[in-house]
Amino acid sequence: MIMTKGHSSLEVNRIHPLDAPDPRAIPPLAALLAFERAATQLSFRRAARDLSLSPSAISHQIRGLEEQFGTRLFVRGARSVRLTDDGARYLAKVSAALATLQEASRDMLRQRGQASGELWISSLPFFTSAVLLPALPEFKRRHPQLTLRIEATHQYADFSGSRVDVAIRYGREHATGLKVEPLVEVRGLAVCTPALVKGGLRTPADLSREVLIHVTSQPRAWPAWLKEAGLPNLTPRGHLWLDSVPAMLEAAEHGLGVALAMAPLIKVRPGFGKRLVAPFAFEPTHHETIYLVSRTEQARDRRIAAVRRWIADAVARAS
């Protein structure tokens, strides 16, 4: 209300700012990421692997979204899932929103890294120890002006909210704006100490007398291997669960059980053939591909190209 000299009044329409986002209407970021991964991969299991969660955790997040919106986002089958019409419409908007966050976060986080010649690599722990670390001296010789920051992790490589320039992961990424290049195919290879072999470990069936060593992020590795070996119902003497492939291999070197390594990369591990051996001639036909992921927009970035060439050369030597 504005008062004039004649004490009359004029009603002035107030201009209200846009309403602030209602946090009650916006699902948690974890739920959106779980939905985007599951919808993109059309698999709760692969989404769980990407985000280093359990499939039940992915299912819980998506069930929360469905309860919030009062509609189903997925049609769940015995072995697969597919999007409903509502799910497909929501995916388009969620992907666009995450892409906007990605662009804003990338611009903020990468400014200093670009100026300083830093490159951030997010790599699988075993790939880091088996391939990247032995090749680091060669990289420093070739590119002394560049600084590498390497994060060894199984977690989903978030190109939007982190400084990741290059990621090394299992499975193809289908996100818009990412360049995906196959690096190497790997297969599960049972490994143990020579002492276990001398003790009678000769065939996969002999694993019933041994402890199987697992990695928590790969719960299906041993069951899939045993199924392909024709032993889906084999019951081992025990199980040992560890949080990383390097820890699993170290446990095997200490004689704590039998581990599943990744061939051919395991062959470059110091001590392979002495402290660790492959007790069986059996080799599974199933394989996984390890990919190098980078941003399409950085295809002409000489620093990224240098890292790609270095990693490809390191893989060739390790294979």
Image (cartoon, grey):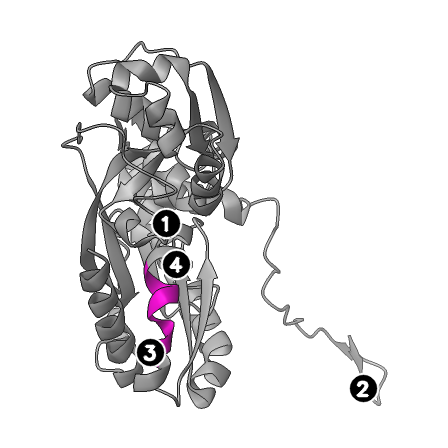
Magenta stretch contains residue 233: no
Instruction: For marks 3 and 1, give the one nearer the viewer.
Output: 1
Mark-to-mark CA distance, 2 and 3 = 76 Å
Name which of mark 2 and mark 1 comes first in the sequence: 2
Question: Which residue matches tag 4?
Answer: 128
**Is the Cβ of the residue at disc 2 closer than 8 Å to that at disc 1?**
no
Magenta stretch contains residue 133: yes
> Callout 2: 10 Å neighbours few (<14), some, many (20+)?
few
Three-letter residue code for mark 3: Phe
Mark-to-mark CA distance, 4 and 2 = 75 Å
**Is the Cβ of the residue at disc 4 closer than 8 Å to that at disc 3?**
no
Magenta segment range?
Answer: 131-139
Residue positioned 35% across, 56% down in the render: 130
Mark-to-mark CA distance, 4 and 1 = 17 Å
Three-letter residue code for mark 2: Thr
In terms of secondary structure, where does tag 1 sit?
loop
Q: How many marks?
A: 4
> Callout 1: 10 Å neighbours few (<14), some, many (20+)?
few
Rendered view: 288 above or below 283 = below
Residue 193 position by quadrant: top left
Three-letter residue code for mark 1: Gly
**Can residue 180 be seen in the rendering of this structure?**
no
The disc at residue 139 is: 3
Q: Measured from the top left, where is residue 91 in percent x and y? A: 33, 46
Residue positioned 44% across, 35% down in the render: 252
